Amino acid sequence: MKNLDKNTMILFGNFDKQNNSFMIDTLFIIDQKATYTPKDVISNFTKSNKNIYINYNDIELSKEFIEISTFPLYFYSNELRNKNLSVYSAVMQNTKEEYIFSYFPCSTGNYFDIPSVKLLNLYNFNNEIKGVSYIDLSIGQITDEWNNITNQILSKKLYLGTYAQSPH
């Protein structure tokens, strides 16, 4: 997942082979990509007085992202400390490309919902998928799948969450 393009769709969740459905946690549409090294991020983070966010190559990295994803790479792996890694920002609902945007299914409670949705016939789940699977789709196919998944979520009386405060 190091070289994904703008408007690539990433589905986080699990495929339920028995019911031929996908348990969706998050639908992520890529907006921008930044390449970074853990060493550079830690250096900028330390210089920024440990603010909530730092701007790195036009992508805001949260304090939580840095502490959870970057600190371990920097402090526990000499091999990865200077390695070029990728981080992606999401297309958000308030951007000019509102026709598709990133979200997580949610209800009015203080918890996330993980609904089951039927995906379009664009994927082959005959084999056991472990880890990451990548399927190259056109923007038209991505838009069709986004509409398909979104309509199913809304029909279940769920909402499209676009912001959640980090737990403290």
Image (tube, rainbow, N blue to C red):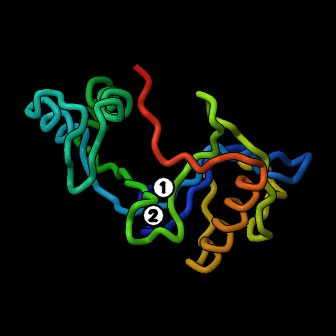
Residue located 20% across and 41% down the image: 54
- Using the image as rendered, state which of residue 111 and residue 15 is in the foreground: 111
Tell me the kind of residue under disc 2: Leu
Q: Is residue 131 visible?
A: no
Q: Are marks 1 and 2 in contact (CB under 8 Å)?
A: yes
What kind of element bears circle 1?
Answer: loop
Q: Position of residue 15 (x, y in %)?
A: 77, 48
Q: How many neighbours does mark 1 have within 10 angstroms: few (below 14), some (14-19), or many (20 or more)?
A: few
Cα separation, mark 1 vs mark 2, equals: 6 Å
Residue behind mark 1:
1
* Residue drawn at point x = 25 percent, y = 49 percent: 36
Mark 2 neighbour density, 10 Å: few (under 14) some (14–19) many (20 or more): some
Point out residue 31 in the picture as x, y percentages from the top left corner.
40, 63
Residue 48: quarter of image? top left
Residue 156 position within the rendered picture, expressed as x and y whole percent measured from the top left: 78, 49
Q: Quadrant of residue 42?
A: top left
Q: Which residue position holds label 2? A: 4
